[in-house]
Image (cartoon, helix red, strand yellow):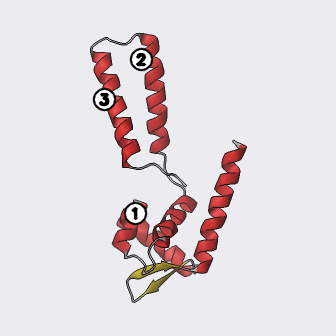
Amino acid sequence: MHCFGASYYSVCCSLATTILTYADANLLGSTEMSLICRLSLDSLCFRFKKRDSATILADIIKSLVGSPKGKRKTNIMQSANLSTDMVNKYLDLLLRNGYVILDDGYMYKPTDRGLRFLRNLETEYIRLRNRV
């Protein structure tokens, strides 16, 4: 769904620092400053928008796809970037609806139904994105 990683965050932080440095040194005119600030703020705002439930569910299932043995809850939290409360809430929802299974009491694995759900979400996301 969203494919921004730590490098994107680093670039945005670096850009913001550079802008503030140039602004302090009065090396940018007001027009240039306004344009650069607007572009960097748009980028930063886009990066930190809250995810909706469908995106979070997809992120959890995607984190499980590359792991044939499954993943522990802690690994899912890290790869989907969720708090303990949030991962518990969403894993419970996924388990109750048959999108993931709990194997050996602590390893989560996606089911065929969960993989179909993920494919459908990604297909709809692409369709909506092409309309904008």
- Left or right? Give the position of 21 relative to 79: left
Of labels 3 and 2, earlier in sequence is 3
Q: Secondary structure at mark 1?
A: helix
17, above or below 5, in the image: above
Residue 76: image location, x then y, percent? 40, 69
15, above or below 76, in the image: above
- Amino acid type of the residue tagged 3 in the rendering: Thr
State the residue position of label 3. 17
Q: CA distance from mark 3 to mark 2?
A: 13 Å
Q: Secondary structure at mark 2?
A: helix
- Left or right? Give the position of 127 relative to 3: right
Q: Secondary structure at mark 3?
A: helix
Which residue is found at the position 46% from the left and 67% from the top? Answer: 63
The circle on residue 79 is: 1
Task: Pick the residue in front: 22 or 98.
Answer: 22
- Left or right? Give the position of 7 relative to 59: left
